[in-house]
Amino acid sequence: MWSDKTILKYIKNTCPGHIHIIKTEELTFHGFPRQPDYAEIKITVKPDEKAIELKSVKEYLKQFREEHLSYERLLNIIYDDFKEVYEPKSLKIVLNPKVRGGLESILIKEEMEKEIC
């Protein structure tokens, strides 16, 4: 188990049709070889029934500070947790780790809007 998704909280979405963008440059974790890594993360959500409670997102992201994860695994964990907890119409996460060894790497994972029958 890589994360505790129960930290993520939500409120009833009373304003349908909006897009919520959450961005922080304060995502920290331990990459390989057990060196601290820093990243910017941008989470774009089109909510359905559940709207994101921001304080819980901050607490959720803090849990990764001591975890040893690759960029790809971290992206997949956060994406899967958001998808499961919030059940959004669409979700896109962009993970932009700080430059290491002169190389910049940007990872993106997204699912487009759910079809409404």
Image (spheres, rainbow, N blue to C red):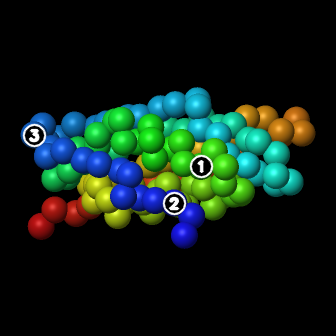
> Which comes before the other along the chain, label 2 or label 3?
2
> Which comes before the other along the chain, label 1 or label 2?
2
Q: Secondary structure at mark 1?
A: helix
Of residues 84 and 7, the one nearer the viewer is: 7
Is residue 66 found left or right of 50 in the rendered image?
A: right
Q: Amino acid at mark 2?
A: Ser
Q: Amino acid at mark 1?
A: Phe
- Marks 1/2 in contact by CB < 8 Å: the verdict is yes
Q: Nearer the viewer, mark 1 or mark 3?
A: 1
At label 2, counting other C-alpha atoms closer than 10 Å, the crowd grade (few under 14, some 14-19, many 20 or more) is some
On the question of residue 69 being in view, the answer is yes
* Residue at (63% x, 45% y) in the render: 65
* Residue at (49% x, 55% y) in the render: 78
- Quarter in which the C terminus is drawn: bottom left
Q: Where does label 2 land, which residue?
A: 3
Of residues 16 and 116, the one nearer the viewer is: 16
Q: Where does label 3 land, which residue?
A: 14
Q: What separation in Å lies between label 2 and label 3 (alpha carbons)?
A: 28 Å
Q: Position of residue 102 (x, y in %)?
A: 88, 35
- Marks 2/3 in contact by CB < 8 Å: the verdict is no
* Residue at (22% x, 63% y) in the render: 115
Q: What separation in Å lies between label 1 and label 3 (alpha carbons)?
A: 31 Å
